[in-house]
Amino acid sequence: MIATVNVTHTEVQTTNAELSAQISSLRRQPNSDNSELRALTARATNAERRLTNAQNQLAQTEERINAMNEKTSSADTKWEARVREYEARLKAAEERVKRERQGGKERIGELEANLAKLQKQLEHANRRNSQLGDIVELNRPLDPGTPR
């Protein structure tokens, strides 16, 4: 049993030496872990700062977009009002032209009827004039040298 205790003691000493070596190596690693941890912390801080800057820029951009949308909305409203006004003017002008054309057609009809009436009166006056001329010719005294 003593041999077993010696072996066990030797094994314990070997294991103890290995663990001491690991502990000393782990004690050295925290320095490298601390520097790595500091580097990672610095990177995380920089990333958070960039995120904050990006969020601020996004908020400013959204404000500008909203302001532009309001301006374009009011401009669109003004243009739509202008278009409606011009459409109303165009419709009124088209109806006015339509009425004037209709009035012109009616006036042409009146003038043509008046022209036909005047032509009939002229024909009647010419016939009457011709008849009167014939009557005057017949009732004119004969000159001694003109044949009848």
Image (cartoon, rainbow, N blue to C red):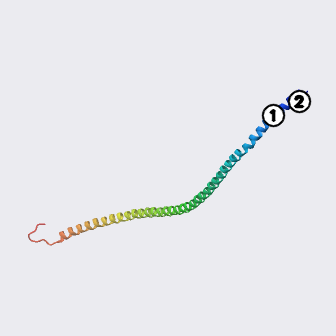
What label does residue 15 carry, if any?
A: 1
- Whichever of callouts 2 and 1 sits on the residue coming sooner in the sequence is 2
The amino acid marked with disc number 1 is Thr
- Residue 111 placement (x, y as % from top left): 35, 65
Q: Secondary structure at mark 2?
A: helix
The residue drawn where x is 39% and y is 62% is 105
On the rendered image, what quadrant is the N terminus found in?
A: top right
Position of 35 relative to 68 (above/below): above
On the rendered image, what quadrant is the C terminus found in?
A: bottom left
Is 144 displayed left or right of 17 in the figure?
left
Q: Provide the residue designation for mark 2.
A: 5
Is 127 displayed left or right of 34 in the figure?
left
- Mark 2 touches mark 1? (CB < 8 Å): no
- Residue 126 placement (x, y as % from top left): 25, 66
Residue farthest toward the right in the current orientation of the protein:
1
Q: Secondary structure at mark 1?
A: helix
Residue farthest toward the left in the current orientation of the protein:
145
The amino acid marked with disc number 2 is Val
